Amino acid sequence: MFIEPFVNNEFLRLALAGGVLVALTCAVAGTFVVLRGLAFVGDALAHGVLPGIATALIFGVSGIIGAAFGSLIMMAGVSLVSRRFRLSGDTAIGLLFVGMLALGVMITSRSRTFVGDLSRILFGELLGVTSRDLISQVCALIIVISIAIIARRPFLLLSVDEGLASSSGFSVRLFHNLMLTMIAVTVVASFQTVGTLLVLGMLIAPAATGALFARRISTMMTVAAVVGSFSTYVGLLVSYHFDLAAGASIVLTAVFIFAVAATYTEIIKTIKTKQSNEHEHQHSHSGAHIR
Amino acid sequence: MKSQIQKSISADQLGVGYSKFPVVDNVSVSLEPGALLVLIGTNGSGKSTILKTMAGLLQPIKGHLEVLGQPTGMLPKRVAYLPQHPISTHTLPLRVHDVVAMGRFAHLGLFRRTSQHDQNIVIDAMKRTGIETQANEPIRDLSGGQQQRTHLAQVLTRQAEILLLDEPTAGLDINGRKLVAELIASERARGVTVVMATHELQDAENANTVMLLAQRVVSIGPPEVALRDEYLRECFGFTQPH
């Protein structure tokens, strides 16, 4: 029941490999998305790639190339609008996000055969992952890990305070854009597996679970990788046994794990606070006797 | 012939602000190694803007400013800056030791590995600020005062020649304030120039120069001159009890 589906079905083995690669890539990029509070940017990038993918598919080019172009335009747009027009980052990102999404839907509405493609772009096609897809995902993982290792110090400083990063000699603009590039690579590489709508869930839910428990960034990333990979396994099993959408099952599992973990940590915190208050109460009580 | 000592900080008719909107104009000051300049004023008076400009986070909008003989922002290893609210502690899974060690990043750059020498500097800074026993605690679990001590330790690990401190005593109890005064004194004794922004008049006691600010320079000079009653009344609307 738990192993057999993967032993008997090659498409499930490929889906598991693809899903785990997405989980590992999202664990690295997602950690910095959560630390730096870039969830909205991640969401915008995930949706911003839609017109690029749609255009690529119309011209019979690989969706990955279209997604890469879409994310580049989105990143450049966010940077330009927020710098030039004295708007808050949220407003600039929101405007571009909606604009790019609308453009994507307009392009897809030009083609009658696009309904299926649109659904595939938005929700992924995990059960259709091929060996070639795995190669591009391994490349994306290597790129994302390399960026995270090289830029770990400025990324950490940026997560704490931009002024601290700048006064330590690191260019805020350069490393912020490098972080966006890392997120964009993750989105572009993951859209085929979990889709542009659901990739955000894989970026945020496992990393947020890691943030609940971890005392160090490396631990947070490790927890995120384990949660993401486990969600992939559980999600695929659920999808296989109950005939449900694979990408959605994986993301829902990751969000469910976060909810359980958050509830657990809250309960532990409440118990500790109660014990500490009781201890203080006993202490003050015994103090009164001495007096 | 008398040898000329290089000024730590030299500002001439400096205007500071955001984009092209000035917050404070006509700031002229010259500090030698080991000096303490205290910036005093109410909220929005321009203290933090001056510090950010000296740290190279903002460009001067007019006039001239040199730090250690260079334009600002050129010497991150030699200038350390403590922001006013330096950390978002809610989500960051960082231990006190990790936060303090981040002060060495200016020296380490992207690729240099942390050496035993760097480790010793970090441990020494934690001892000096009294947070070595919390080294392995997550910073998000500490009180505001303990977090401020952690950030002070981080600034010390830079081993800089200039310290730019934005309200370093914020959130500290009386012992913490005493500690900051002692740290500043010991840094100055080894030739470090300190510029500190504060709301507290008592922080100006040991300063060489005090600058009283109210979106302009109200007064500048030694404490006994800059903190005269007429200037304090102009700046705060009250005078010190004598």
Image (cartoon, helix red, strand yellow):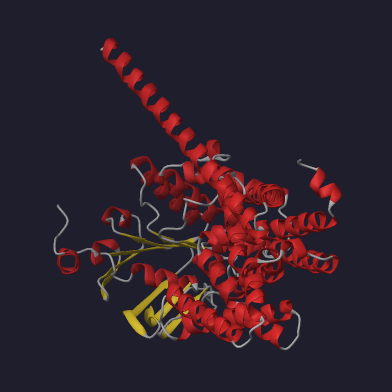
Q: Position of residue A270 (x, y in %)?
A: 42, 33
Compared across the picture, whether B137 is left or right of A116 comes to left
Quarter of the image where the N terminus of chain B is located: bottom right
Residue at 57 percent of width and 57 percent of height:
A204
Q: Position of residue A241 (x, y in %)?
A: 70, 47
Q: Could you tell me if residue A124 is visible in this image?
A: yes
Q: Position of residue B124 (x, y in %)?
A: 59, 44
Compared across the picture, whether A104 is left or right of B15 comes to right
- Image-quadrant location for residue A36: bottom right
Q: Position of residue B201 (x, y in %)?
A: 26, 56
Q: Could you tell me if residue B100 is visible in this image?
A: no
The residue furthest top is: A289
**Total numbered labels placed on residues in the image:** 0
Residue at 63 percent of width and 66 percent of height:
A123
Q: As displayed, is residue B186 above or below residue B208?
A: above
- Image-quadrant location for residue B226: bottom left
Residue at 55 percent of width and 64 percent of height:
A158
Viewer-proximal residue, A288 or A244?
A: A244
Viewer-proximal residue, A249 or A251?
A: A249
Compared across the picture, whether B77 is left or right of B223 comes to right
Q: As displayed, is residue A14 above or below residue B144?
A: below
- Image-quadrant location for residue B84: bottom left
